[in-house]
Image: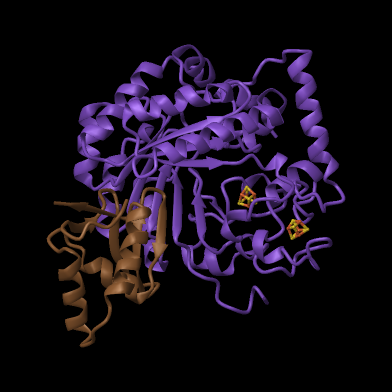
Amino acid sequence: MSLLTDHALQIAPGYRLQWEEAQNMFVLLYPEGLIELNQSSAEILQVCDGTKKLADIVHVLETKFETTGLESDIVNFLTIALDNGWLTQRA
Amino acid sequence: MAGLLNAPSPPRWLLAELTYACPLQCPYCSNPLDYANLSNELSTNDWKRVLKQSRDMGAVQLGFSGGEPLVRKDLVELVEYSHELGYYINLITSGYNMDEAKIIELKEAGLDHIQVSIQASSQELNDFIAGTKSFEHKKSVAKLIKKHGYPMVLCVVLHRQNIHQMKDILDMAIELGADFVELANTQYYGWAHHNRDQLMPTQEQLQAAEAIANEYRDTQKGKMKIYYVVPDYYEGRPKACMNGWGTTFLTIAPDGVALPCHSARQLPNFDCPNVNDSSISDIWNKSKAFNYFRGDDWMKEPCRSCPEKDKDFGGCHCQAFLLTGDATNTDPVCDLSPLHHTVTDAIDKAAQTNQTVQQPLLFRNSKNSKLFNH
Ligand code: SF4
Ligand code: SF4
């Protein structure tokens, strides 16, 4: 599935993003599996709340980390996440 | 790695085998052959203690299985409690005894997903393998699961008697709206090991099935995820044991025995600890059973000096035990094992059974289980 810049992104049904105290990290949970997320992946997924499109996500994260030029990394990650079915997008 | 010196990584996965009771009789069941002699199921409060202690250590994926977990009267209560603790809760069921009211009740309690197993793509074969009339009911349960917003995982265990239905099985999965399909070639433990000669497919059957799985994986991309679990007897290299013994998975059997893997209780003199006697953290960190195959100090040759030992951890210890009589041997599936012939002999023997005698399958039920009293 390719990334549609005019669609909002959200965690796919059946998937759950959750902070794990014992492991000190975010994990993405789904039927019979889990993915341990590094910090940047977790930051991106947390912003995918079903209301924000690519440009909004980039804006939120660049503001939060007081930086610019994050777009290509974010696009790369979102593309992987969509291919794996972790995210869905809707108009 | 000096296994005992470093604190082991915490469990991530808890498999709670709530009961060995099951209305079906699948001849490839991984439960112990003598399950009928293992009574004394844990109480609701025992399970709650196990759930809490495991969660505190870091377990986050939770599977309720069995036997048939729906047989337990306290299933909804346990799901509710686990949800409060923050588990992602998987129910692994045959679908037998499931109805719409139960599906709704479990959803409200916080169940995240239901995996239904179907034995074949036709009623006749499904009901034969299951030893019980169940096909139409399973299909309607699968549809209800979808209807109530669960991700739907369909599991089909593959073996010689159904593997030719691969295409029909996948078409059925599409028709039922499955989100994930798990096509699991039989692994030869428990009842499956006993029935191996009648269950093992031929190499040609496997290649044909795998080609179909790959074809559907392409056409269903983004719609239905297909997991195809290869049968290791034909692989030349063993599967990595449980992601490393005592690193990730914790199984609790119906009677409270804690196992590093669901087959481990068949290993002799292994002294698996019981949750009635010890805390989960003592079991995980300190028990002999959980430390036994941690690291590589236990390894013999050829594994000990093998460059692949960090990849497969010497393979499956339960399989090494079943086929060679010694769990510390290299998994004989590995073609570097000096006992690899035990696997090739088994393949040959199954092929002969295929052509000549038609031996009956031994179905999993308590009458047959009592044959294995020891
Ligand atoms: S010899 Fe042992 S470690 Fe090496 S590939 Fe075979 S099973 Fe794995
Ligand atoms: S020993 Fe074998 S059955 Fe047990 S966990 Fe390892 S791979 Fe699985």
Name the image quarter holding residue B291.
bottom right
Vertical relation: B206 (above or below) B286: above
Q: Colour of chain B?
A: purple
In front: B236, or B267?
Answer: B236
Image quadrant holding the N terminus of chain B, namely bottom right
Residue B225 place in picture, x, y as percent? 41, 42
Residue B283 place in picture, x, y as percent? 54, 63
Image quadrant holding the C terminus of chain B, namely top right
In front: A82, or B369?
Answer: A82
In front: B254, or B3?
Answer: B3
- How many circles with numbers are drawn on the protein? 0
Q: Residue at x 82, y 53 (%)?
A: B336
Q: Quadrant of ligand 1?
A: bottom right
Viewed as shown, does residue A45 lie left or right of A90? right
Q: Residue at x 32, y 55 (%)?
A: A82
Residue B45 place in picture, x, y as percent? 34, 51
Viewed as shown, does residue A75 lie left or right of B253? left
Viewed as shown, does residue B115 lie left or right of B366? left
Viewed as shown, does residue B193 lie left or right of A40? right
Give the chain coloured brown: A
Vertical relation: B176 (above or below) B253: above
Residue A18 place in picture, x, y as percent? 29, 64
Name the image quarter holding residue A81.
bottom left
Furthest toward the bottom, the residue is A66
Res. B279 in view: no
